[in-house]
Amino acid sequence: MKQLIGYCGIDCEKCDAYIATKNNDQSLREKTAKLWSELNNAPILPEHINCEGCRVNGKKTVYCDSLCAIRHCAMEKRVTTCGDCPKMDTCPIVGALHANNPESRQNLIMGVKMDK
């Protein structure tokens, strides 16, 4: 499976935090911080927008590093992604994300098929 598919199935290469980090794009960091602050009703600053992917070594946003329940669960279970977890289809945590982002679920299904 592609390393830049997150534990949940989100494609990190399409994430504005990843793009801003890779391109050192301060304008995109500012735009992303503003949007994420509004969406999460939390103070997110441009300097918080640094991430190299949740399954690779390197920088992570505070959310991805410390607060993401999906990432913490997958790491605790020692699965490559949620696609390797037998409870994925009934999991309320990743299920909520997949309900809003069906592409992320498809990424996991395709990744599991590619691994076999």
Image (spheres, rainbow, N blue to C red):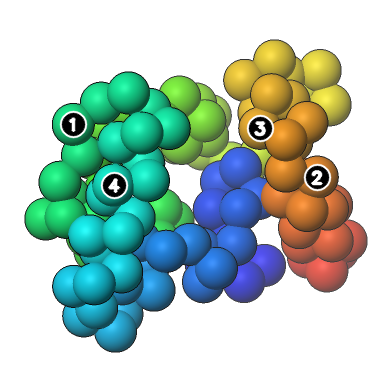
| Disc 2 + disc 4, Cβ < 8 Å | no
Kind of residue at badge 3 = Leu
Residue labelled with disc 1: 43
Question: Mark 3, mark 4: which one is toward the viewer?
Answer: 4
- Quadrant occupied by the C terminus: bottom right
Residue 64 percent across, percent down from the top left = 35, 41
The CA span between labels 2 and 1 is 28 Å
Q: Earlier in the sequence, mark 2 or mark 1?
A: 1
The CA span between labels 2 and 3 is 8 Å
Where residue 76 sits, quadrant-wise, is top left
Residue 107 percent across, percent down from the top left = 76, 58
Where residue 31 sits, quadrant-wise, is bottom left
Judging depth in this view, the residue of 112 and 44 nearest the camera is: 44
Q: Earlier in the sequence, mark 3 or mark 4?
A: 4
Kind of residue at badge 2 = Pro
Which residue is found at the position 69% from the left and 24% from the top?
A: 96
> Can residue 114 be seen from the camera position used here?
yes
Residue 22 percent across, percent down from the top left = 31, 80
Kind of residue at badge 4 = Lys
Which residue is found at the position 72% from the left and 50% from the top?
A: 104
Q: Around disc 3, counting alpha carbons within 10 Å, would you say few (fewer than 14), some (14 to 19), or many (20 or more)?
A: some
Residue 27 percent across, percent down from the top left = 24, 72
Judging depth in this view, the residue of 19 and 32 nearest the camera is: 32
Residue labelled with disc 4: 34
- Quadrant occupied by the N terminus: bottom right
Indicate left or right for 74 with 48 as reference.
right
Which residue is found at the position 73% from the left and 25% from the top?
A: 95
The CA span between labels 4 and 1 is 9 Å
Relative to residue 108, is residue 26 depicted above or below?
below
Question: Mark 3, mark 1: which one is toward the viewer?
Answer: 1
Residue labelled with disc 2: 102
Kind of residue at badge 1 = Pro
